Image (cartoon, rainbow, N blue to C red):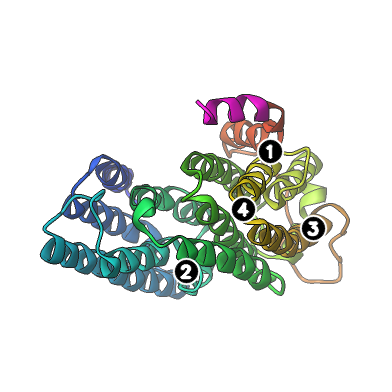
Amino acid sequence: MNPYVLTILLSSLGLGTVLTFASSHWLLAWMGLEINTLAIIPIMAQQHHPRAIEATTKYFLTQATAAAMILFASTTNAWLMGEWEIHQLSHPLATTTVMLALALKLGLAPVHFWLPEVLQGLELTTGLILSTWQKLAPFALMIQVAPTINSPLLVAIGLLSTLVGGWGGLNQTQLRKILAYSSIAHLGWMVLILQFAPSLTLLSLSLYIIMTSSAFLALKTNNALTINTLATSWTKSPTLAALAALVLLSLGGLPPLSGFMPKWLILQELTKQGLPLSATLAAMTALLSLYFYLRLCYALTLTIYPNTLTATAPWRLNFTMITLPLSIITILALGLLPLTPAVTAMLTL
């Protein structure tokens, strides 16, 4: 793609998200979401491959449906209650419709079916944008409307997402689909705690973005798209393979890695709020996710690629990829747990 065109599209992507962040009126927020969607579509379709075009079409139809639902809900609220402000969303029909529309935009269960299929058709860099940056604007709206949404609905969506995210990734062999289900599970944890401690949701979202970015960049550096090709990583770059395995364990929430921090604090907060059953169910669904992360770690570090298969030989050419972002993000994805006391002190301010 022409660098000037790419710059314009990425600028529009940022503009749409910032516009949604800054808006207090539903029409302005809707406009930001639309700019965001229209900016990423050419980036998704730049490969001119049938799978990429199919993924782009599915994404466009899904996002257009969600945007129409948001517009319908905000118009309904304005008609019945006379309010266009995001914070003044008060009619039950409008709040439930907006929640479902934002769940559809984010890929939360039970409206998650588009996310693994779309992510599978994209290259890893575009998939990274879709899994991280594209979650920010809908989450900003969800945090603003969360106080008005029915609490059992949020808890149910959160628990269902963690269950679907863990269950769906078990039998996958494509890494992009596994990361999509991982995304669904992490978003479920964020929604679960959204109404009780929004600051914990923001912490969880920040760490999710760091860990997911590290995982995507590591896979892109290794040029791996399936579990089988992960087995070649150890011979190409042992250090990166070891670090990528640790990043995956961090995504699974194992101590002493960064990913343990949000899960620990969320389970603690759920118990404080008198929801021990929800906390127990969430912790058990995390074990499902942990299984497929361990499966990936096994393929990365304990498997030697069979020489009998016909595969493109990984020639050791001069490495031209910039690895500084990967290095910084991997350090953050692995080493932030000791800062937990400082984080909890900041959250209680």
Q: Is residue 218 visible?
A: no
Residues at discs 1 and 3 in contact (Cβ within 8 Å) = no
Looking at numbered disc 4 in the image, what kind of residue is underneath it? Gly
Residue 40 seen in the current view: yes
**Magenta: predominant secondary structure element?**
helix
* Residue depth check, mark 4 versus mark 1: number of the one nearer the observer: 4
**Relative to residue 278, is residue 169 depicted above or below?**
below
Residue under the image location 61 percent in, 59 percent down: 182
Of tags 2 and 4, the one toward the viewer is 4
Which amino acid, mark 1?
Ser
Q: What element carries label 2?
A: helix
Q: Residues within 10 Å of mark 1 (few under 14, many from 20)?
A: many
Q: Where is residue 98 in the image (x, y as percent from the top left)?
A: 31, 64
SS category of the residue bearing label 3: helix
Of all residues shown, which one is farthest toward the front?
274
- As displayed, is residue 88 above or below residue 112? above
Residue 109 picture location, percent across and down: 51, 70
Q: Nearer the observer, disc 2 or disc 3?
A: 3
Q: Position of residue 304 (x, y in %)?
A: 87, 59
User: Magenta stretch?
Assistant: 340-349
